[in-house]
Amino acid sequence: MTNALQSEPNPGTFDADLRLLRVARELAVGIRPLDEILELHEIDPDDWEAFKSTPQFTKLLSEEIAAWESASNTRERVRLKSLAFLEEALPEYFGRAHDRREPLSAKIELLKAIAKIAGIDGGPKDADPGQKFSVVINLGSTGKLTFEERRPAITVEAEEEE
């Protein structure tokens, strides 16, 4: 097994922090036994002994246990597992979005999906059926004033002429 973590992992490096987070999350969820988790993340037993008691790791483990135990129903646990999966996949997505060999269309779709998940896709934030009222006043080349207000929808029935 490779020496994936030094006897004192270098906190603050993205890979080390991510590896510690993944191990803490796996332990909190309790799906795999410890030896399998260590093998999966290429951590030898000596490294495990060295970092399992560090303040950084114990804090991560406590946070992951609290998050997992607060998920009292199946839907919430599935949501948390999905978010954990997404968080772990983000470094790969980041790399692929910046890879010149990836097709532009794939990058655009990836960025749209990430923006939607992050809530910054420009879509409506509330499912308000109301209408938006906007006033824009151009002040020449110096700028413009904009006033916006959301109003409830008004339905006007047309009367039939006889």
Image: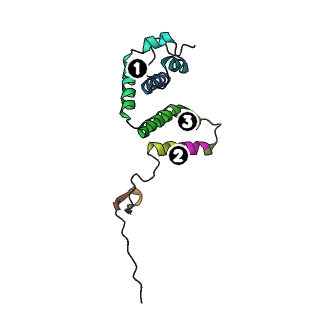
What whole-number distance in Å separates the C-alpha atoms at marks 2 and 3? 12 Å
Q: Amino acid at mark 1?
A: Phe
Q: Residue at x 46, y 36 (%)?
A: 83
Q: Nearer the viewer, residue 31 or 95?
A: 31
Q: Please, is residue 122 above or below residue 14 in the view?
A: below
Question: Could you say which quadrant of the image residue 101 lies in?
Answer: top right
Query: Does the magenta-highlighted stretch encompass residue 107?
Result: yes
Question: Horizontal placement of 144 versus 116: left or right?
Answer: left
Q: In the structure shown, which secondary structural element does the residue marked by tag 3 occupy?
A: helix
Q: Which residue is mark 2?
A: 112
Q: From the viewer's perspective, is the residue at label 3 or at label 1 nearer?
A: 1
Q: Amino acid at mark 3?
A: Tyr
Please provide percent x and percent y for residue 37. Answer: 51, 20
Q: Which residues are magenta?
A: 106-111
What whole-number distance in Å separates the C-alpha atoms at marks 3 and 1? 25 Å
Please provide percent x and percent y for residue 56. Answer: 39, 20
Q: Which residue is mark 3?
A: 93
Please provide percent x and percent y for residue 30. Answer: 45, 25
Decide which of tag 3 and tag 1 comes sooner along the chain.
Answer: 1
What whole-number distance in Å separates the C-alpha atoms at marks 1 and 2? 33 Å
Q: Residue at x 57, y 38 (%)?
A: 97
Query: Does the magenta-highlighted stretch encompass residue 10?
Result: no
Task: Determine which of the numbered discs, if any, sits on residue 133 in the image.
Answer: none
Q: Amino acid at mark 2?
A: Lys
Q: Which residue is mark 1?
A: 57
Please provide percent x and percent y for residue 22. Answer: 47, 25
Image quarter (top left, top right, bottom left or bottom right) of the C terminus: bottom left
